[in-house]
Amino acid sequence: MIRVNQVKLRTGHSQEDLRRQAASMLRIPEQNITELRIARQSIDARKKPEIFYSYSLDVAVRDEEHILHRFRGKENLVCRSERTEGGHSAEYHFPTSGKRERTGPVIIVGTGPAGLFCGYFLAMHGYRPILLERGRCVEERQKDVERFWETGKLDTVSNVQFGEGGAGTFSDGKLNTLVKDRDGRNRAVLETFVRFGAKESICYDAKPHIGTDVLCTVVKRMREEIIRLGGKVYFESRVTDICVEAGRVAGVTAAGPGGSRQLKCGQLVLAIGHSARDTFSMLERRRVPMEAKAFAVGLRVEHPQGMINKSQYGLEEPGDLGAAPYKVTARAGNGRGVYSFCMCPGGYVVNASSEEGRTAVNGMSYSGRNGKNANSAIIVTVTPEDFGSEHPLAGIEFQRRLEEKAYALGGGKIPVQRYGNFKRCVEQERCGIGQDLSIGQAVAHCGDAASRKKEVINDEILSGGKHRMNAVEDAGSVENMDCIESIDNGVSANDGFGPQCKGMYTWADVSRILPGACNEAIVEGMEAFGRQIAGFNRPDACLSGVESRTSSPVRISRDESLQSQIRGLYPCGEGAGYAGGIVSAAMDGIRVAEAIAKEYAP
């Protein structure tokens, strides 16, 4: 097949238009194209509001060699397809099974992308793995999460972090990755998603996503296929201990509603999520080698989706283009990187807590991305030097301290603050104004005379003491509180822009959650991003906290065979520190499945 690049068509075109344009670029009759596949689709908005789709196409044509010769020296436009090797389609191939006999079944801990794909690929090749999931199946999990968002009553067994599908189940479901795909694992992951219910377009879209609603269906179908192939999946089975004999893993202890039980294994895949803090503690006690690693923390920011559409596409209503995404990065004056993360077009900020007395947030979109707001996390890199300890689990304690502050500020609800207020609080803190100063003194120290009255009103509302409580009582409702803040920021109280949250929220001084250096970096970043996307630093943008679960704060050590120092133990996926998203975690799960299969017979 021939790869034809830079095929551009306006939005709203047909499949016939695509074929016609490809034939025109190749300078051949349309009937000479016998097959056409989309290899890649992206959006070209450089001449907005004139928007084009840009394609790379794989086409089968008559007299292929003649056409390739004609375009010699113009391989950027026309070349031999990357998907062909020796005339045949290049596909992912699972390795040939090894000869070594296993002493017990493969046990996989966790059914996030890493565990689910590891289990699925092993099951397809006759290994009949056992999957242990601390949470509930995705059908029950959806009900538990909705109940938490409606009532505020947290289920520590089944929530946004724990349960079948992993934390990514309640996210935007982005399927892009920066991991190099020399062996076809990336495509294998996407094709597997399609096989179990995702749209075929994820295989060629430059920025594919699946959405929470579709992902739940895919996860359920994958589990059913694992079971059909002879595997077993046990829910509400939290691993509380591992058994090690002569330096090799031999089994696990799993706790559930009926008590604890011991399970023997030949290989143990640790595909735990980044929030399995009790499991990390158990592994550390068992002297499984691990280390603290850098990650990022921050706040989630919301803007009207129409504003983002206008900036990215030149259109507030982009039609079949769908809600526009964005990605922004900057470096703060203190040297810290600050950037957007897990951007959710047409999405919601969700209460993603998993521990009592601690609040964490995340972002989520449905497949239609039809919410009113765009949101993303604006996060700042933190390293073990910030954690206050060299202990391997110091990053977890750092996360917990932030989440405890967020919980206290919101009383268990998501704490939210307008960016204009947040910025003033951070600037006052940078000026050296302590909380003991009166609000009037603070304003005199940092604010200009024209803005003092507004700052006094805002800071009384958001000070966290009796002024804030009185203001909330006077407002009478979240909606009225939103109105007070909007008016004070010079924004029409009737413009309809406010937080779009899954879970209850309340107005609070969000600047009290993060360390000062992180707050300052976020303000610098927001101002820089305002120069990239008009209105990004608008004073009524909504900040929610705390975004603390961006990636694992721990890396469980493994060698080139993907095993721990404890042999037979395979750290895997995002929680173990080897992935950063749905696809990269799934790819790592496949890698571990391959490593086991190469050595052992089914």
Image: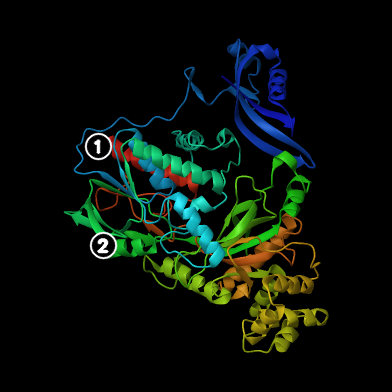
The answer to whether 439 appears left or right of 396 in the picture is right
Which of the 4 quarters of the picture holds residue 313? top right
Residue 601 horizontal/vertical position (percent): 24, 34
Residue at far left of view: 246
* Quarter that holds the C terminus: top left
Tell me whether circle 1 and circle 2 mark residues in contact (CB < 8 Å).
Answer: no
Tell me the CA gap for discs 1 and 2. 26 Å
Marking on residue 600: 1
Callout 2: SS: loop
Determine which quarter of the picture holds residue 442: bottom right
Residue shown at 50% from the left, 70% from the top: 403
Give the residue type at disc 2: Arg
Tell me the element at label 1: loop
Left or right: where 81 falls relative to 108? right
Q: Position of residue 491 (x, y in %)?
A: 80, 67
What amino acid is found at the position of numbered circle 1 in the picture?
Tyr
Q: Is residue 230 left or right of residue 40?
A: left
Question: Would residue 160 be seen by someone viewing this image from the given angle?
Answer: no
Per the rendering, the mark at residue 286 is: 2
Comparing 483 with 332, the one in front is 483
Q: Who comes first in sequence, dot 1 or dot 2?
A: 2
Q: Residue at x 67, y 52 (%)?
A: 371
At which x and y percent is residue 155? Answer: 44, 64
The image shows residue 575, relative to residue 513, as above or below, that is: above
Residue 360 appears in the figure: yes
- Seen in the picture, residue 304 relative to 80 is either above or below; the reply is below
The one nearer the camera, 435 or 197, is 197
Q: Nearer the viewer, residue 26 or 511?
A: 511
The outermost residue toward the right is 450
Position of the N terminus, as image quadrant, is top right
Q: Residue at x 44, y 66 (%)?
A: 384
